[in-house]
Image (spheres, helix red, strand yellow):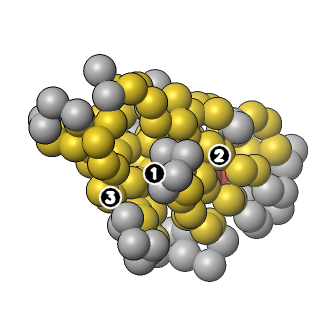
């Protein structure tokens, strides 16, 4: 069994910063791509950023230049440094990972989400 647990969300003023973390645990053999998604009230879940196992990154245009995705392969951790936050960044942020388990099952797993609210 695999679990993803996000942390680090909260309330921040416009222009502020937050750092989200996602811890993967359980019967993990290898983690391939890891990504962040977000979902604002009334909207569909949208992709924010992705990082490959080797470190290659890609970002949604809406966060390019403000957010930084990173990972620690030894600790099975994923991070999202969010800078210059805007009210439109308000959403529940979800961690997603492509994981090969020790039983050789390969699938995508989701965390439970962490709320980020940008407001003055």
Q: Are the two marked residues, 2 and 1, in contact with CB atoms closer than 8 angstroms? A: yes
As measured in the structure, the alpha-carbon distance from the residue carrying label 1 to the one carrying label 3 is: 10 Å
Q: Are the two marked residues, 2 and 3, in contact with CB atoms closer than 8 angstroms? A: no
Residue 22's image quarter? top right
Report the side of 73 relative to 16 (left or right): left
Q: What is the quadrant of the N terminus in the image?
A: top left
As measured in the structure, the alpha-carbon distance from the residue carrying label 2 to the one carrying label 1 is: 10 Å
Classify 65 as above or below 8: below
Residue located beneath label 3 in the image: 33
Residue located beneath label 1 in the image: 36
Which of the pair 2/36 is nearer the observer?
2
Classify 80 as above or below 1: below
**Image point 74% across, 45% down: which residue?**
118
Report the side of 60 relative to 78 (left or right): left
Nearer the observer, disc 2 or disc 3?
Answer: 3
Residue located beneath label 2 in the image: 20
Which numbered disc, 2 or 1, marks the residue that appears first in the sequence?
2
Report the side of 29 relative to 90 (left or right): left
Q: Are the two marked residues, 1 and 3, in contact with CB atoms closer than 8 angstroms? A: no
Q: Position of residue 63 (x, y in %)?
A: 55, 68
Q: Secondary structure at mark 2?
A: strand
Report the side of 90 relative to 12 (left or right): left
Instruction: Assess disc 2: are there few (<14), some (14-19) or many (≥20) residues with their C-alpha within 10 Å of its C-alpha.
Output: many
Looking at the image, can residue 67 be seen?
yes
Nearer the observer, disc 1 or disc 3?
Answer: 3
Q: What is the quadrant of the C terminus in the image?
A: top right
Q: Position of residue 37 (x, y in %)?
A: 42, 48
Classify 38 as above or below 50: above
Instruction: Assess disc 1: are there few (<14), some (14-19) or many (≥20) residues with their C-alpha within 10 Å of its C-alpha.
Output: many
Which numbered disc, 2 or 3, marks the residue that appears first in the sequence?
2
Instruction: Assess disc 3: are there few (<14), some (14-19) or many (≥20) residues with their C-alpha within 10 Å of its C-alpha.
Output: some
């Amino acid at each position: 069994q695999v679990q993803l647990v996000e942390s680090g969300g909260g309330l921040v003023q416009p222009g502020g910063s937050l750092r989200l973390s996602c811890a993967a645990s359980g019967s993990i053999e290898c983690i391939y791509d890891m990504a962040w998604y977000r979902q604002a009230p009334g909207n569909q879940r949208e992709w924010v950023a992705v990082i490959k196992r080797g470190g290659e990154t890609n970002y949604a245009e809406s966060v390019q230049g403000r957010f930084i995705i990173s990972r620690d392969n030894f600790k099975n951790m994923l991070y999202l440094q969010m800078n210059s936050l805007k009210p439109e960044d308000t959403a529940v942020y979800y961690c997603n990972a492509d994981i090969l388990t020790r039983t050789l099952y390969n699938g995508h797993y989701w965390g439970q989400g962490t709320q980020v609210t940008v407001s003055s």
